[in-house]
Image: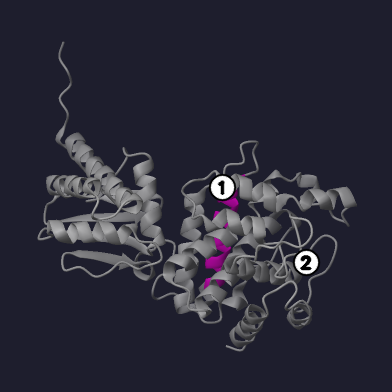
């Protein structure tokens, strides 16, 4: 029996998949143990050896849309390892890595340890270069864009959110990768557009409120986080969590969500369950940052520990990221027209926010948010 001979292209793709697998395993191994552990040295060595099999003048790893591209070849085989590496690169604020031919074993090992560290940007290396989100994110507007194109860009974000959430099928599967692209694009816009709040997307119909609201809350949350000096990786996590804060509404009957009138008490009780539904659903998606289901659960828990879904006062303090998203959620909800009430003016909302400062909201974050809005609208 004759076995088919693999083509050069197939062999190359196999070698690339082998390198990606070795790289992710080495990163994961360091996360579990340390550089002193003998197994880490072994896996780092395998990664370096696999790198040599695909090395030409350089090895280029990049994310384009939702695909991992290595040396201009899409990586099709690799399964969870591909998703793992994409997620790690995005968290580092990096969409492209170039490893040059002169890279040493020590340098590659340091890079692997660097990729395993959370809360830190990638360091600089003589033979390993990384590209920042500002220049490489495909969903970001081009360098020469005009300010009047920002509304269209934000509207495109709404459409991507709608597409990511799908049509609310019985499977209720959310396209997480599509949402990651939206967040990266928003972060890039903030680098260029100081008055972004002028372009918060309006709700055109009651049925699209969930998608538009999620987009606006993400924008407002990233704006707050950046003003507080929160690092690039955490901007991404907060922006993604804000997009998904209401994911639990996928499990609430549509007739309740879109009811054009005041909710009955039993209907409101069902609505109040959406943070719990969302947290349970998001916790099962292992590729998400751990803070995402936390924010989904806590965004209606107040600063003083009251609120829902947990009854009464909670001893556990609401996470500061949840506090940021809760402020964005409250502000955008009141400035949006709903079936049962008209939208409110910004200054009216600020009056309510100040009244709730110290009970519903973190006083420092409320003052910061109000100052940010005033500053943005005056530009």
Which of the two marks, 1 or 2, is nearer to us in this view? Answer: 1
Tell me the residue at 52%/79% (across/down): 228
Q: Nearer the N terminus, badge 1 or badge 2?
A: 1
On residue 22, the disc is: none
Count of marks overlaid on the render: 2
Q: Indicate left or right for 129 with 8 as reference.
A: right
- Give the overall secondary structure of the magenta segment: helix
Q: Position of residue 247 (x, y in %)?
A: 64, 51
What numbered label is drawn on residue 283?
Answer: 1
Judged left or right of residue 365, residue 194 is: left
Give the residue drawn at x 55%, y 61%: 157
Where is 127 relative to 352, above or below? above
Question: Which of these two is toward me, 240 or 60?
Answer: 240
The magenta segment: 150-166
Tell me the crowding category of disc 2: few under 14, some 14 to 19, or many 20 or more residues within 10 angstroms, Cα based. some
| Left or right placement of residue 87 versus residue 224 in this view | left
Q: Secondary structure at mark 1?
A: helix
Dividing the image into 4 quarters, which one contains the N terminus?
Answer: top left
Would you name the residue on which mark 2 appears? 337
Q: Are marks 1 and 2 in contact (CB under 8 Å)?
A: no
Q: Position of residue 348 (x, y in %)?
A: 79, 81
Residue 257 place in picture, x, y as percent: 77, 51
> Which quarter of the figure has residue 329?
bottom right
Please say whether residue 274 is one of the residues in the magenta stretch: no
Residues at marks 1 and 2, CA–CA distance in whole angstroms: 31 Å
Q: Nearer the viewer, residue 105 or 317?
A: 317
| Label 2 SS | loop
Can residue 378 be seen at all in this image of the molecule? yes
Q: Residue at x 21, y 47 (%)?
A: 38
Quadrant location of the C terminus? bottom right
Q: Is residue 156 magenta?
A: yes
Colour pattern of the rendering: one colour
């Amino acid at each position: 029996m004759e076995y088919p001979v693999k083509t050069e292209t197939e062999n190359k793709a196999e070698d690339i998949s082998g390198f990606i697998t070795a790289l992710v395993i080495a990163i994961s191994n360091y996360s579990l143990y340390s550089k002193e552990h003998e197994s880490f040295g072994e896996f780092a060595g395998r990664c370096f050896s696999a790198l040599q099999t695909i090395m030409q003048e350089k090895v280029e790893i990049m994310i384009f849309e939702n695909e991992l591209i290595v040396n201009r070849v899409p990586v099709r085989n690799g399964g969870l390892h591909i998703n793992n590496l994409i997620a790690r690169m995005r968290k580092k604020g990096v969409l492209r890595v170039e490893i040059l031919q002169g890279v040493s074993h020590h340098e590659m090992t340091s890079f692997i340890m660097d990729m395993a560290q959370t809360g830190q940007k990638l360091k600089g290396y003589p033979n390993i270069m990384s590209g920042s989100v500002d220049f490489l994110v495909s969903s970001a507007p081009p360098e020469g864009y005009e300010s009047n194109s920002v509304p269209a860009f934000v509207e495109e974000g709404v459409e991507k959110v709608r597409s990511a959430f799908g049509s609310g099928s019985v499977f209720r599967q959310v396209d997480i990768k599509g949402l990651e692209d939206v967040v990266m694009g928003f972060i890039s816009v903030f680098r260029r557009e100081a008055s972004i709040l002028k372009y918060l997307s309006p709700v055109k119909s009651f049925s699209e409120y969930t998608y538009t609201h999620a987009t606006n809350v993400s924008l407002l949350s990233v704006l707050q986080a950046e003003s507080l000096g929160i690092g690039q990786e955490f901007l991404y996590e907060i922006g993604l969590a804000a997009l998904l804060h209401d994911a639990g509404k996928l499990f609430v009957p549509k007739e309740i969500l879109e009811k054009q009138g005041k909710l009955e008490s039993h209907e409101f009780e069902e609505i109040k369950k959406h943070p719990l539904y969302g947290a349970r659903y998001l916790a099962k998606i292992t590729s998400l940052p751990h803070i995402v289901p936390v924010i989904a659960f806590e965004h209606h828990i107040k600063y003083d520990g009251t609120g829902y879904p947990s009854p009464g006062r909670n001893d556990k303090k609401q996470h500061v990221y949840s506090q940021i998203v809760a402020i964005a959620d409250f502000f955008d909800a009141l400035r949006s027209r709903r079936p049962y009430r008209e939208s409110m003016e910004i200054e009216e909302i600020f009056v309510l926010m100040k009244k709730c400062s110290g009970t519903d909201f973190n006083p420092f974050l409320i003052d910061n948010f109000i100052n940010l809005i005033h500053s943005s609208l005056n530009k």
